Amino acid sequence: MSESLSLRDRYLALIDEIVQNTLKGKISSQEQVYQMLLKSVTTDTGEVFELALSDRLNSTQQQVDTEIDELKQAKATRSLRAIKTIQSQWQRAEEQNKANYAIATAVKEITTADAGSHLAVLLRIIDPNQKYPLSLQQIQQLSKSLQPFAQANPDLKQISDGIIRGLASWQRLQGHLVSWMYEQSQSLGFGGIPGERGPWATWAKQVNSELPASLFRTLAIEQSVIEFVRQQRDITLSDWVEIAIIFQYLQRGLVNWFDQQAYNVQAGSKLSISTFLTFAVIWSQLANGLGESTPYGRASSQVLLQILRTFTQRPYFPLYGGIFASFAGTYLRDALNYLNEPLRQVEGTQEKARILTLLGYSQRALGQYDRSANFHQQALEIARNAGDRACEIANLNHLSRTYVAKENYAEAINYSQRALILSRQAGDRTGEANALVNLGYSEVMQAQQIEQIEPETYEAAINYLQQGLTLSERLGDVQSKALCVSSLGIAYLVVGQPQTAIKYLEDGFKTAQTSGDLYLQGLNLANLSEAYNHLQNQEKAIYTGCLGMYLLNQIASHEWRKPAKLLIILQGQIGMAAFSNVLQQHRSKIISVIGVDGYDYIPQLLEEL
């Protein structure tokens, strides 16, 4: 206590000294005050200084308010102004002290780490999920502070060099962060013409280091990142740190830019989601290529999990979606499979529950129903224990959808009913909209399975679907609406009303395009093909079937085979020449959705069936 009082008195004396020197004209700038505070107040005693400063501020303010003598009041007013200057410069000094302390602590942690763990410690220190993440300038200072230790430890020299190179590369890339978007003639995203347009080709031209440039070129031409990294025999620690810095700042820069696009919130969040997923997958592929048991492989997984943890905290984290249109490129087709391995290292947290939710949805799209159910069951338990009610409800809904895919309709109805009850209790309107849709959809499919023909059965089920649609539209929830109208379209197809089904399926396709859900886009087109075929409109059945088949194949969904089989039947009915003629007539419309390469790939897909 006596030490505390002594320190307080010392700080009061410092404040009084600065005030008196200000009144005497000995202090001519705020910078002088700032330097005095940096020199005299230690980081760990800042709270004591703040209390002393608060006391002086309050007592001086009271004197200004109550003093009758004009000369004394004038002096008190000048003193108050000087104290407020101290207050503003203390805030500045405190930030600097915190930065110095953070850097000193980081240097100590890295330099005293066990051999072989320096990289893991560095990544933990520069993790953007830290309560007080290091700024770019602080990371630069960290690199300089490591240099005195470089002679004694080669790893520390390589880390320092890697940071310097990474920050220099980022500075060159920063001006070209989004320039590639204005070169693309079609939709925004990470697709584009392989090797010609898109971010990777643009960025490859800007960096001077060979390894990052080669990695960018590999991504630009949609070659395997796994194979690329396995061919690199001499990756140094410095190389890896440079890549880590470059890719982390690119990802964070893009997300920040997209998040600030107020002109189109939905487009901005859609592209932010795409960015998180794309960079997460790149790191997962790097981890896979380098080997999970190697230091660089483990470090890649560490960065991946940092990205996913940041993603799960965003308000637009897709609890009801998983594969998005901007998440394009053949090199990413099976990418979400790779995210499974690093998750085994994470304890049961809210973040893990949300990541597993994403994986479960994606596995269902790929036709991996058992894996999907397993992911959602894990996520359900973790979310319940973590108190993440929205995530818990989402996984009940996903389990309902997965069991529909498994043709276990009783279980699907069970999960949708649980989701409906829980969502209404929690006031989760998005969860409720999805639960209504899943309940109606499950009941339609069950009625079809047991060959119930009573109109009342289908009417009750379709009523649930209509309620879900109304609610999703009221909420302005595009992803939920896409699911609602798609489900209604399938329901009307099941009950033998193809004309009504087409209305909803066309709306479902457009809405899925808006939400960016590639799986729902493909599914709607495949079902449209079936509906048009029921109406004997072979031309539109071929057009929509080809698009649906291609899109589903692009995300490796086994469901591409269903429209493909129908197309083969149609090809047999009208003949090869007439079939090719229909494709040629719709060429421009097909290219507008899947590009020239997609159009050219259609005949090959039909041969693969």
Image (cartoon, helix red, strand yellow):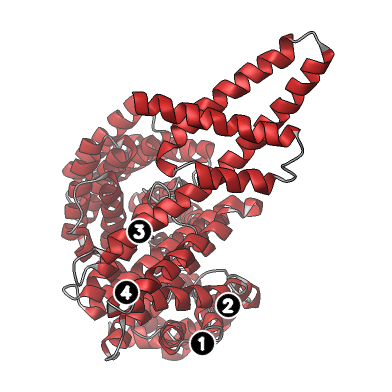
Callout 3, which amino acid? Ala
The residue lying at 48 percent from left, 83 percent from top is 599
Please indicate, yes or no, whether residue 208 appears anywhere in the rendered image.
yes
Q: Earlier in the sequence, mark 3 or mark 1?
A: 3
The residue lying at 33 percent from left, 23 percent from top is 1
Label 1: few (<14), some or many (≥20) within 10 Å? few
User: Residue 208 bears which disc, if any?
Assistant: 1
State the residue position of label 3.
106
Q: CA separation, marks 2 and 4?
A: 25 Å
The residue lying at 61 percent from left, 46 percent from top is 34
Q: Are marks 1 and 2 in contact (CB under 8 Å)?
A: yes
Q: Earlier in the sequence, mark 2 or mark 4?
A: 4
Callout 4, which amino acid? Leu
Q: CA separation, marks 2 and 3?
A: 27 Å
State the residue position of label 4.
156
Q: If the image is split into quadrants, where does the C terminus sit? A: bottom left
Q: Nearer the viewer, residue 209 or 561?
A: 209
Callout 2, which amino acid? Arg
Label 2: few (<14), some or many (≥20) within 10 Å? some
Q: Is residue 571 left or right of residue 336?
A: right
Q: Nearer the viewer, residue 248 or 436?
A: 248
Callout 3: SS: helix
